[in-house]
Amino acid sequence: MNRIAKGDRVRVDIPDEADPDHDLHHGRHGTVVKVIQDDASRTTGDDRDGALFRIKFDEGGTGDFRRRDLRPPLE
């Protein structure tokens, strides 16, 4: 996904099984409820790190993710 905005439906995709968030969030679907701008991209040099996206999961709860961890939903 190149552009992600509030209201978009997404799927969390964390392919690295060693990532601490993999077991908890990989494959979950939800809706972007907030875009949180930050300056992490200056530190990492990766434009994908310029914002966090707060996802409200279909089954309840929320999580914050970088663009690299979000894909179009499987529906």
Image (cartoon, grey):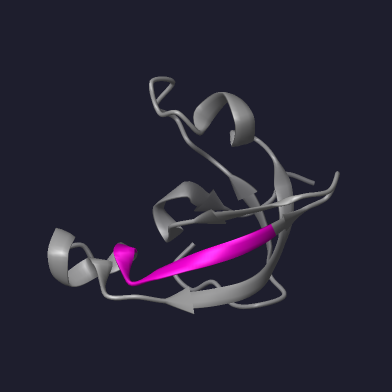
- Asked if 33 appears above or below 58 in the picture, the reply is below
Q: Is residue 72 visible?
A: yes
Dominant secondary-structure state across the stretch colored magenta: strand
> Horizontal and vertical percent for residue 11?
64, 48
Instruction: Give the camera-side residue of 40 and 72.
Output: 40
Quarter holding residue 19:
top left
Residue 9 relative to residue 64: left or right: right
Q: Indicate the position of residue 46 as horizontal and vertical percent values.
A: 20, 62
Q: Position of residue 47 (x, y in %)?
A: 25, 69
Q: Where are the magenta residues, as a range?
A: 49-55
Quarter residue 5 falls in: bottom right
Tell me if residue 45 can be seen: no
Question: Would you place residue 46 above or below residue 28 in this image?
Answer: below
Residues 22 and 72: in front is 22
Viewer-proximal residue, 62 or 50?
62
Which residue is most to the right?
Answer: 59
**Residue 53 magenta-highlighted:** yes
Q: Is residue 68 magenta?
A: no
Q: Quadrant of residue 42?
A: bottom left
Locate residue 44 relative to residue 59 in the image: left or right.
left
Q: Is residue 75 left or right of residue 36?
A: right
Q: Is residue 42 left or right of residue 61?
A: left
Q: Residue at x 58, y 24 (%)?
A: 23
User: Can you say whether 15 is above or below 37 in the image?
Assistant: above
Q: Position of residue 51 (x, y in %)?
A: 41, 71
Residue at x-position 65% and y-position 77%: 6
Residue at x 69%, y 40% (from the top left corner): 28
Q: How many marks?
A: 0
* Residue under the point 72% across and 47% down: 29
